[in-house]
Each structure stands twice: as structure tokens, then as C-alpha cells.
Image (tube, rainbow, N blue to C red):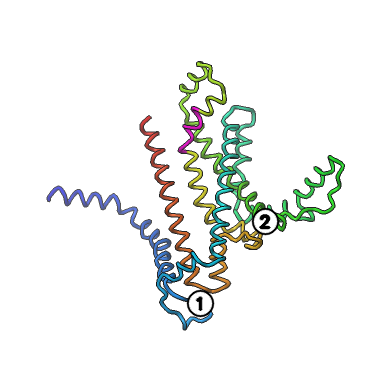
Amino acid sequence: AGRGAPGRARAWATRAPLLPALVFLIAVTQLPFVATLVISLFDWNSLAPDDRSFAGVSNYGSVFTDASLRESVFTTVLLTASVVIVSVVLGLLLALLLDRKFIGRGFVRTLLITPFLLVPVSAALMWKHVLYNPEYGLLNGGWAWFTGLFGVSSPAQPDWISDMPLLAVEASLVWQWTPFMMLILLAGLQSRPAEIMEAAKLDGATGWQMFRFLTVPHLRRYLELGVLLGSIYIVQNFDAVFTLTSGGLGTANLPYTIYQTFYQAHEYGLASAAGVVVVIGTIVIATFALRVVSSLFSEEANR
């Protein structure tokens, strides 16, 4: 007992500097989530505040049965899957390029990282006005130049957002998230054991064989980490959808639908229930991401 008390005192002394950060974290994250959870159990429309009543889990039933919410869930899954897959493939190609030594590699790496450093709203506005605009956008100028190479005059400039709205949103997100995947995969490539790669070369392995049997297995954890982290962020994406299409033309994902339900329909209970569903889904994905990260650190520690 005598030894236990000083030990506990030392433990609390060690943890004491972390307590303010813990209290702040609870105040700004957990308390609002508890409040959202409570509101989700009520039938609450701000236009009729006196008619508020306890609804139990009926709001959650509406989340999974309402046609617009189901469509937004499908759009969210499609948007997330397409952006993550394309970003991982392009990020892997760029990482393989930057893993080679060439003049100006540092400058090229900085340029490729830049899209990820932009404010999401600024990036979406750039795509909307600088690239997608049907009158003066750079994509339409490039389209006219491309058709002119074949002697074909384009009768009308395509309106990229109106003609292919979901693809327009996906392209802007792929452009912004490819550098993130590239950084993760480049870190994986640079952590490959050099002696194993040299031994494979001496044994006569081709570049494709080294990539297939050595590089890809080594990058498996990094690929999983990139997919999981990318999914967490893109599932919650609101900026691109709001800025480019305002949720129209079938591009409303779940975060935008929650925004519409809360601020336009004023259905606080239903919007809170949908938000709780998003948080739970994100926690599930984050759990897998943390397991992948811990396994990466374990592998590095065992080397």
C-alpha cells in the first residue's frame, strides 16, 4: 500500500499536463455529440418549436427509409469509392515517379503536393470558374483546340457541371486528394529494404517482377492506410458539392443532405439522426485505420 500511493501520485503527476487538453477535447467534441444524440431522439422542427416531442428512434428509421436520404447515401458511397480508387492509382504512379532520382525532383514534388495544401473551398471555386466555366474556362479552350487538330469545329462548348455533374465533383476531389495518397505511398516506397531490392536485381528479376512480388506486398499496409484515411475525409466532404453544384443534379451526398435538412427544412431531429449515422460510420472506418497504423508501427519496430 505504501508503494502504491507514491506510484499513483507519480502517475497522476505525469498525466496532469494532459488534463487541460483532455478537458478541452471533451468540451468541443464529446459534449456536442451527446447534444446531437439527444436532439436526434426528438421530433423537432424549428419553425414550430412548441410542437417538439419525443420520437425515440423513429428519426433513424426515416434516415434509412427516406428516398432522398437513401439516394444521398448511394451518392456518398459512389463518390467516395470512385475518388479513393482513382486517387490511389494516380498517387501510386506519381510515387513511383518521385521514387526515382532525376534533376528537379524536389521542385516537382513540391508542385505535386500543392493541391492538397489549398483550402477546399478555394480549390472548388478554382475548378468551377477557371476550368469548368462554359464561356471562359480553360477546359473549353483545350476542348476547342483538341477538336481543331482534327479539323472539327465544336458547335457548342460543353457545360461540364451541367452535362456531367458528379464527374465534375469527382475530378476536383481526385485532383486534391491524389497528393495525399502520393505522400503515403512514397513514404512506403522509401521504406523498402534496399538489400532485398538489390538482391532481386542480382538474381535477374525484371522491373515488373520486382514491383509485383516485392513492392506491392510491401505497400499493402500503406495502400490500406491511404484508402481508409481517404474514405474518412471524403465521406465527410461538403465543400466541393456545395461550391460546384449546390447539391443539385444528383450530386447531393449525405453531409450536404444533412445541411439541407437542418438549415433549409429546419428538421433538427432528422438532421441530427443523419449526423449520428455519419459519425458512427466514420468511427468504424477510423477504427480500421488505427489498426492499420498500429500494425505499420509494429512492423517497423520489429525490423
Q: Position of residue 91 (x, y in %)?
A: 58, 39
Secondary structure under tag 1 reads loop
In the rendered image, the vertical position of residue 92 relative to residue 250, given as above or below: above
Residue at image mark 1: 45
Q: Earlier in the sequence, mark 2 or mark 1?
A: 1
Secondary structure under tag 2 reads helix
Q: Position of residue 278 (x, y in %)?
A: 48, 59
Start-end of magenta stretch? 213-221
Q: Residue at x 59, y 58 (%)?
A: 239
Q: Quadrant of residue 113?
A: top right
Which quadrant is the C terminus positioned in? top left
**Is 38 left or right of 230, judged from the image as shown?**
left
Q: Position of residue 15 (x, y in %)?
A: 30, 52
Spatial separation of the CA atoms under disc 2 and disc 1? 31 Å
Q: Nearer the viewer, mark 2 or mark 1?
A: 2
In the rendered image, the vertical position of residue 266 relative to residue 214, given as above or below: below
Residue at image mark 2: 165
Q: Main secondary structure of the magenta part?
A: helix
Q: Residue at x 72, y 51 (%)?
A: 131
